[in-house]
Image: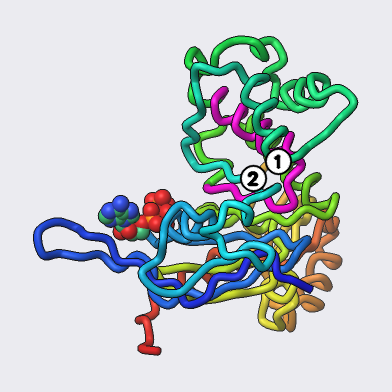
Amino acid sequence: MTTAIELVRLKKTYRAGWRKTKVALDDLSLSVQPGEAFGFIGANGAGKSTTIKALMGLLAPDEGGASLFGIPALQPRARQRVAYVPESPILFDQLTPLELMDYGCAYHGVRKPSMREHCLSWLARFGLEEVANKPIRGFSKGMTQRAALAHALAIEPRLLVLDEPLSGLDPVGRKLVMDVMGEFHAAGGTLFFSSHVLYDVQRLADRFGIIHQGRLRALGNLSELEQAPDTALQLRIAGENAPTQATPLGAGEWLIEVQQNDLWNILDTCRERGMRVVELRPRLDLEQFFNQLVEAPIADQ
Ligand SMILES: Nc1ncnc2c1ncn2[C@@H]1O[C@H](COP(=O)(O)OP(=O)(O)OP(=O)(O)O)[C@@H](O)[C@H]1O
């Protein structure tokens, strides 16, 4: 099967002032299979956007190469039915969302009995039906971001690439975008998104990659991380007589972080004290994993 994304030994160095350079990507290789949801994690300045630009053919790496569905990323045909929404999208703002989407769908070969209805339904999903015929230049930042997402999904992409899709959104906007991303993935679409919010990655990705100082430092599977033998568990309990190690959550509920090998003892104690178990789940420690990784010195390759 052709990989959806293939990055091979990418290197990119920027000029950073007089006689100074900044290595943004250092020998970065990565592949993503069709149908996967891949979360690309890194702190500010780690190299996420540079990677995405190389992936989208917007930046030529100094060394190495990127391909989409087996086609070199620098060739425009590689981007057929590939949608990309940068962190702060810049759209042709003299156009209306409907005009923009009409153009995008035609470019990507999307055909529907009624293109107008197709585009309007995506605009409605993002709460923009009222402004479907208004020029984008009057839109707020959030509206522009939603218009870019509606456009991206209207082209029915086989790959959706999102750079920090949830940053700067209010809770309602976050839920909407998370729902749409989840639905896109559930329908078989390939999703590649960057984030420095590990919670987002946990909720949405099948696999994750961690970039730090331009190098890919870890690649992992979220379910593997959950099943690791030393993964802590979170036990939520309710009642009046909580064990001393429990942390109050309010409304009579308590939380205990417990290692696998200690679980049965703790459960026995809770039973003896007449506590009720509300929830038991793995404490997916992506955050801790990430922190350990970025604090460790980078070994020479
Ligand atoms: N055009 C540029 N010229 C010079 N340096 C750049 C340029 N673009 C990025 N850099 C530098 O390269 C490094 C990687 O930047 P990049 O934008 O890829 O990181 P990022 O992980 O996307 O960060 P953020 O989360 O803050 O957007 C940073 O140190 C950044 O300052």
Q: Is residue 2 left or right of residue 86?
A: right
267 or 127, which lies in front?
127
- What residue appears at the point 72 percent right and 33 percent down from the top-left corner? 105
Q: In the rendered structure, are the residues bearing label 1 and label 2 in contact, judged by CB atoms less than 8 Å apart?
A: no
Residue holding disc 2: 83
Residue type at mark 2 is Ala
Look at 70% across and 80% down and name the residue there.
228
The one of 290 and 132 positioned closer to us in this rendering: 132
Residue position marked by numbered label 1 in the rendering? 108
Q: In the structure shown, which secondary structural element does the residue marked by tag 2 occupy?
A: strand
Is 151 inside the magenta-drawn segment? yes
Q: Examine the rendering and report whether any part of residue 44 can be seen.
A: no
Residues in magenta, as a range: 143-163
- Report the residue at 40% width, 65% height from top: 61
Q: Which image quarter: residue 104?
A: top right
Task: Indicate the position of residue 253 as horizontal and vertical percent values.
Answer: 73, 48
Determine crowd level at label 1: few under 14, some 14-19, many 20+ residues with C-alpha closer than 10 A.
some
- Where ligand 1 lies, by image quadrant? bottom left
Q: Is residue 140 above or below residue 20?
A: above
Q: Is residue 87 left or right of residue 118?
A: left
Between the C-alphas of marks 1 and 2, the distance is 10 Å
Residue closer to the observer: 139 or 258: 139
Q: Nearer the viewer, mark 1 or mark 2?
A: 1
